[in-house]
Image (cartoon, rainbow, N blue to C red):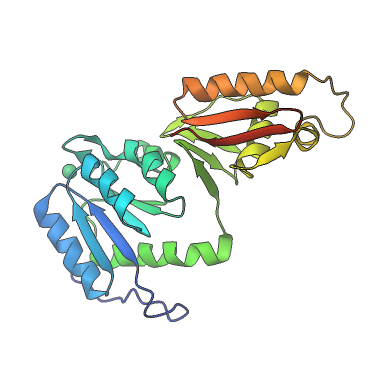
Amino acid sequence: MRSRRASIHDPTRCSRCSLRILIVEDEAELAGALRSILEREHFIVDHVESMAMAREAVLSGSYDLILLDRNLPDGEGLTLMSALRRHNSGLAVIVLSAHGEIEDRVTGLDGGADDYLVKPFAADELLARIRAIRRRPAEMGPEEIAVGALIFDLTNDEARVGTQRLDLARREMRVLSALIKRHGRTVLREVLEQAVFGFDDEIQSNTLDAHVSRLRRKLSDANANVGIHPVRGVGYLLRAIN
Ligand code: CA
């Protein structure tokens, strides 16, 4: 890692609002170097060495950002992303990996990473990428909604579990979109029917239910940990299955 010059501090932000960062990295030397770079920027830094420890840490701490290694002793780091976001949907993830092929980076970004940095990297670049991620929420708002293991990409109308994209028909996608944007609350039947069929289509009363039941099966097959519950006579409700 090269020496650091640029400062992470963003003058438009509260200087006392320190970022909480979790390093998930099993190489002790790299983890130590990362920690000192980040602590010099006055970030609050924790370090764990495995996926299991990362899960525990995210449950007990409220992190803003995770620096995630891919080759971890207990598995592929990318498979952690949806689980981590389930507990904190505002969590940013930068993948740090020696796998630097285009395909690797695409897999990481499609899998839900906010950024992907190939090892070895310069400290300056890491800090610049963290600054870029910090600027993003204020400008763009949330781009994804995470419920259970499911991640719904609002920009591209795309649903996935981990790196696995769900193959949904157009109307199933519209049902899911309407439900997930109001997850945890009952969505009226009429609202869903309008979202799914538009105003002009003829609506048969059981068609919505058919779309919901196909969607439910696909979510269950993909282990999305998301349930769609009927609310009798009123509509449907989507929430995480615990
Ligand atoms: Ca590793």
Q: Is the C terminus in the top left, top right, bottom left or bottom right quadrant?
A: top left
Q: Residue at x 46, y 24 (%)?
A: 222
> Is residue 46 placed above or below 114 in the rendered structure?
below
- Residue 97 visible? The answer is no
Q: In this rendering, would 214 be left or right of 92? A: right
| Residue 6 drawn at (x, y percent) | 30, 75
Q: Residue at x 54, y 34 (%)?
A: 159
| View quadrant of ligand 1 | top left
Furthest toward the left, the residue is: 29
Residue 11's image quarter? Answer: bottom left
- Residue 215 visible? The answer is yes
Residue 101's image quarter? Answer: top left
Counting the numbered discs, the total is 0
> Is residue 197 placed above or below 53 in the rendered structure?
above
| Residue 105 drawn at (x, y percent) | 36, 42
Q: Residue at x 71, y 27 (%)?
A: 232
Q: In this rendering, would 144 be left or right of 25? A: right
Q: Nearer the viewer, residue 95 or 213?
A: 213
| Residue 225 drawn at (x, y percent) | 46, 30
Q: In this rendering, would 107 be left or right of 185? A: left
Q: Nearer the viewer, residue 124 or 102?
A: 124
> Is residue 122 placed above or below 67 in the rendered structure?
below
Q: Residue at x 32, y 64 (%)?
A: 20
Q: Is the N terminus in the top left, top right, bottom left or bottom right quadrant?
A: bottom left
| Residue 90 drawn at (x, y percent) | 46, 55
